[in-house]
Amino acid sequence: MSVQDLTDDAVAGKKLSVFQKIFPEPTGTNGFEEIIRAGEPLRDVEREYSLVGGVPLSKKREYLALPVCQDALRLLRIGLAKPLFLPRTSYTTDHYEAYACLRALARLLATSVYVACADGRTDNAVRIAGDVLTFTHALQGVSYIGSLTAISVEAIVLKPLVQLRDSLSVADCRRLTRLMEQSLAKPDQAYRAFSVERGYLLGMVAAWREKWDGMFDVLEQLYAPSEDVPETPQYRESLRYAALVREDPTVRERVLNEMLELITQHFDCVDAMMRDPTGRLVLMPPPNADANRHPMVPLLRNAFFVVEETAVRKSVQRRVSLQLVAIHAAIRAFRWENDRLPKTLDELELRASLVTDPFTAKSILYDPEATGTGYALASAGALFPGANGKPDFRERITFPWTKPK
């Protein structure tokens, strides 16, 4: 189907698929084309099976046997054999729909892992984990929304592997630990995602120099009242400053220059936090940071810099999650070999990159029970500033993730 065909369909009122919107001119050489096609139809059929906990094994088998699921797995295998890249544009509904397709595919793969473990095909379950890490590594570098989606996909698929780790053989456990180690050794695509965002925002400000009304279009879209959201002080303030900037080119130039400076400072801070997340994980500027800036600049910052802090924390948490999966598998292998739990993580003889908590630069927290039957394994978590005079605090991270209290 050509771009003209798609345009004609859109004009005729025909609904385009997510695949058609993202890949109006498919090349056949990009594996993400098959992967999006694999995930898209799953969103309709999975609702009937409600694949969120408490689903009987028979129901999971029934779901996997559906032709659409079998076709999705076939397309995934084809896609993984090709180079992987998603087109990068500004945030659109089309991309959010594409990420929803990937999460549906992740739920299919998690179901496949569960059934494979139930059937004693644990080597196949570990192979699925490896496949997932292949395409999430590529997805991470698209944008930080893509990066967050990749993290979610990994968590969905790896969760049943950790929960069912007692069914894994020694060889499975060692392969799983090796997979996590290999993935962690690859360049962290989150850096690329943040670099893409920096470039996108700098380009947007540069475009405003040519067509500065675009600045106000953005503010009106983000702060404008609606049926659900009443008119806010920020909206009234943005209109007032917009009128001023429209009338005064000197003020307009000041706002643009301050935005460029702010973007550079902001993403330099993001990069520093990614490289060393042991300090306070906070990107919000201090109260007096905007004292000498035009009042419109904080409004623009609040419009665009809303998720980086979460994305930084989640990106480091992804590293931690892969470490925890590797350690869980190594502990299970040790238990097979020695018929006991390790007293400390040192007994596992793992690389420092697997057992060092990036949030503290100290060892991952490991606490075996006195009975020798269970253990707790966690990262200390990011350091957050306290509120209202309270001391700094951390939220421990386990895998599978649990919501902090």
Image (cartoon, grey):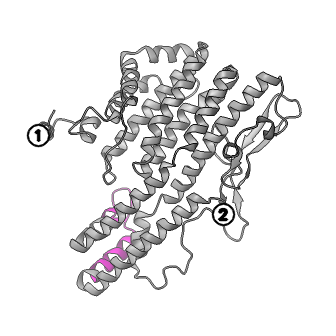
In the image, is 86 to the left or to the right of 195? left
For residue 104: magenta? no
| Residue at which label 2 appears | 279
**Residue 240 is drawn in which quadrant?**
bottom left
Identified at 42% across, 46% down, the residue is 146
Image position, residue 222 (x, y; %) = 35, 63
Identified at 79% across, 23% down, the residue is 337
In the image, is 280 to the left or to the right of 79? right
Q: Is residue 148 above or below residue 161?
A: below
| Residue at which label 1 appears | 4
Identified at 43% across, 50% down, the residue is 145
In the image, is 393 to the left or to the right of 147? right
**Residue 169 is drawn in which quadrant?**
top right
Image position, residue 246 (x, y; %) = 24, 80
For residue 224: magenta? yes
Q: Which residues are magenta?
A: 220-244
Q: Is residue 247 above or below residue 125?
A: below
The residue carrying pointer 2 sits among few (fewer than 14), some (14 to 19) or many (20 or more) residues within 10 Å by Cα, namely few
In the picture as drawn, the residue positioned furthest to the right comes out as 370
The amino acid type, in three-letter code, at marker 1 is Gln
* 164 and 274: which is toward the camera: 274
Instruction: Say which element carries label 2.
Output: loop
Instruction: Say which element carries label 1.
Output: helix
Which mark is drawn over residue 41? none
Q: Image quadrant for the N terminus?
A: top left
Image position, residue 284 (x, y; %) = 54, 68
